[in-house]
Image (cartoon, rainbow, N blue to C red):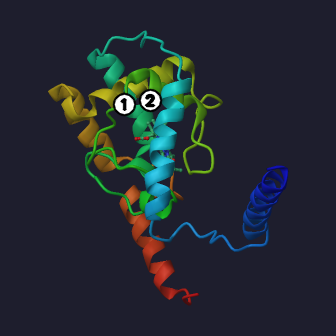
Amino acid sequence: MSRFLIGFATGVVLVLLALVCYVRFGFVDPRADRPMGALEMKIAMPALDAAVDRRAPSVQNPLQATDDNLTAGMKIYQSNCAGCHGDVVHTHTAFGDSFYPRAPQFAEDAPDMPENQNFYIVAHGVRLSGMPGWKTSLKEQEMWQVTTFLSHMDKLPAPVQAAWKSAAGGVESGVGGGGSADSGAKDEKKDKMEMPAH
Ligand code: HEC
């Protein structure tokens, strides 16, 4: 019995060692422009949802979804988030597709998580992804405003929707190397095509 246990433990240690060597000695593809792995999607995405569900404190959004708060949230979204997550005019940004995991495109698929969880992700970001934690650059009130905007994005009151359209049409997006989300992304595509394939 004890010989079996020693054999079993040695086997486990060897498998773990092989895994560590595999990662440490460069066998993992570091490129972000690869198709998403099916296994990673099946494991990592539910894991992120579960981790946020477990950790996000169950706080109430202190703000009402008034036109003023939604408009303030929209402006924060347009200047900080739209370059990666898209907006009402640029519903799908190529820049968002350049991340691994991809940046979800909220104008195509509105974020449907509870507000305390969206707030938690906005404040802290998502490790090993392109999603930054915003609590160093946005005030708490601003993070709630953008959270309120996220959860009303697909059902905005008409005046806020109109303001969003005009902000998205004319505004230079703050992220993605300047330029609107679309034109920046097109330039990147062109650069990519001129690069030798490896
Ligand atoms: C530089 C690109 C980038 C910027 C800028 C950015 N994000 Fe993200 N965001 C991402 C990526 C990439 C993910 C996906 C992370 C993952 O799935 O692990 C993400 C995920 C999220 C999620 C979780 C969505 C889900 O369904 O799990 C929320 C909510 C979010 N971002 C909100 C925002 C808000 C609000 C802003 C602006 C204040 C913002 N993001 C700015 C790249 C970005």
Picture coordinates of residue 147, whole percent (x, y): 41, 26
Q: Label 2 neighbourhood size at 10 Å, few (<14), some (14-19), many (20+)?
A: many
Q: Is residue 81 left or right of residue 2?
A: left
Picture coordinates of residue 69, whole percent (x, y): 35, 18
Choose top left, top right, bottom left or bottom right for residue 61.
top left
Tag 2's secondary structure? Answer: helix
- Asked if residue 181 is positioned above or below residue 142 in the image, the reply reads below
Choose top left, top right, bottom left or bottom right for residue 51.
top right
Choose top left, top right, bottom left or bottom right for residue 11.
bottom right
76 or 97: nearer the viewer: 97
Disc 2 Cβ-to-ligand 1 distance below 8 Å: yes
Residue in the image at 40% along x and 40% along y: 78
Picture coordinates of residue 99, whole percent (x, y): 51, 59
Picture coordinates of residue 163, whole percent (x, y): 25, 34
Q: Which residue is mark 1?
A: 113
Marks 1/2: CA–CA distance: 6 Å
